[in-house]
Amino acid sequence: MVLMIQCALYLELVNVRYDATRELEIPLFRTTQWGWFTVAIFYTYGEWLRDFAFSKPGLHWLLPVLRYHGAVAFVLFSGVLVGTIATLKRKLIRYQVSHLSWSVTSIVLIVAQLKGTVSNIFNGLFWFMMPAAAVVANDTFAYVCGVTFGKKFVKQPFLPTLSPNKTWEGFVGASFMTLVFCYFFAQFLARFDLMSCPVDNLYFTPRLFDSRDHLDCTDNYTLRLDQKVNVLGVSLSLPAAHGLVIGLVASLIAPWGGFLASAIKRAYDIKDFGTLIPGHGGVMDRMDCQLLIMMAAYVQFRTFHAPRFAAWPPATLIARASLLPREDQLKVLEGLQKLVGAVGAVGAS
């Protein structure tokens, strides 16, 4: 699903600068354009799959193939680079280079910002559903607060150059309401194992909504309501704390992704990026804020949630140790025994 969305987003963005007359004169123009996107996708997903396979014994059979992932990515990159340069034409070189720059920008917006989305899903659907819901809630509250209180307190538009209809009342009101929503919704999601537990393997068949056979709820990364953190002297459940951070980003940072999309549309004098969704434009028109919040959720997990526990959960440590030669496994075991013995001695004293 994530890959399909990325493909649709890239198609809409590159079509913004589409010039049929010029592109008919350029050999392999579309091929090289999509080649850059394919290389970026291959490298990004391959890197994630390699790290995931390392931590899951059932996927160790993939490691001999994934070992060459970086080399294959470099070969593909080199091929696309050579193909792009070889097809440059003297009279159209300015157009081609500008389009190459736009393709790279589009890849950064789509692939880089959604790089952690698959990790979010496999770390527990909470890290996918919570940010997605926060952006939808913020958009809804911004509309309601803007219609209800817009320009009653502050006459100056919030961002007149890009969105003259945006009001300060809508922005501030939506921020407050989004934080309230995220505080309660995060704790609601954390009640369900399907949302809070990481996935234990890579599956190619659908899992039942109420099934737990694909989850690892013993993993340290599992979100639990009984986990507490202290925030500015206030004790909060861990899901609520994460929900508030996501809500803060959804309120103050994610809307600027939408403003960037508005700037692109104004620059190229288009109303919508596409017509896939009747009355709502294209995929980019619906995903502009989601791109940024998904990246923020990934960074939040890696920075503030995972480091609360061991560098690797026990299952991951064991899975990686199983790949070592016998003599190295014995060294790891000896080191762990010494570590546990030292900790026990300190505790006894």
Image (tube, rainbow, N blue to C red):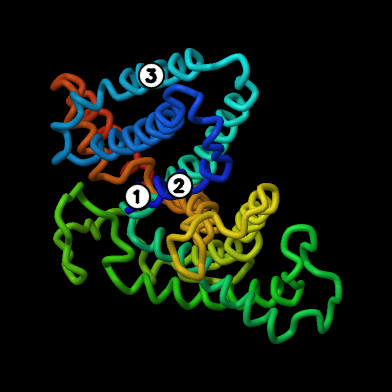
Residue 119 lies, in percent from the top left, at 36, 48
Q: Along the polypeptide, which appears first: circle 1 or circle 3?
A: 1
Q: Is residue 163 left or right of residue 255?
A: right
Total numbered labels placed on residues in the image: 3
Q: Could you tell me if the residues under marks 1 and 3 are in contact, i.e. CB atoms within 8 Å?
A: no
Mark 1 vs mark 3, CA separation in Å: 24 Å
Q: Residues within 10 Å of mark 1 (few under 14, many from 20)?
A: few
Q: Quadrant of residue 335?
A: top left
Query: In the orientation shown, which residue stands out farthest toward the right?
Result: 155
Q: Which residue is mark 1?
A: 4
Q: The residue tagged with tag 3: helix, strand or loop?
A: helix
Q: Quick check: 187 above or below 320?
A: below
Mark 3 vs mark 2, CA separation in Å: 21 Å
Q: Is residue 85 left or right of residue 126?
A: right
Q: Which residue is mark 2?
A: 114
Residue 64 lies, in percent from the top left, at 18, 24
Disc ID at residue 35: none
Q: Along the polypeptide, which appears first: circle 3 or circle 2?
A: 3
Q: Along the polypeptide, which appears first: circle 1 or circle 2?
A: 1
Residue at position x 44%, y 65% in the image: 277
269 and 166: which is toward the camera: 269
Residue at position x 41%, y 49% in the image: 8
Q: The residue tagged with tag 1: helix, strand or loop?
A: helix
Residue 124 lies, in percent from the top left, at 33, 58
Tell me the amino acid under the disc marked 2: Leu
Q: Which residue is mark 3?
A: 74
Tell me the amino acid under the disc marked 1: Met
Residue at position x 43%, y 43% in the image: 115
Residue at position x 42%, y 74% in the image: 187
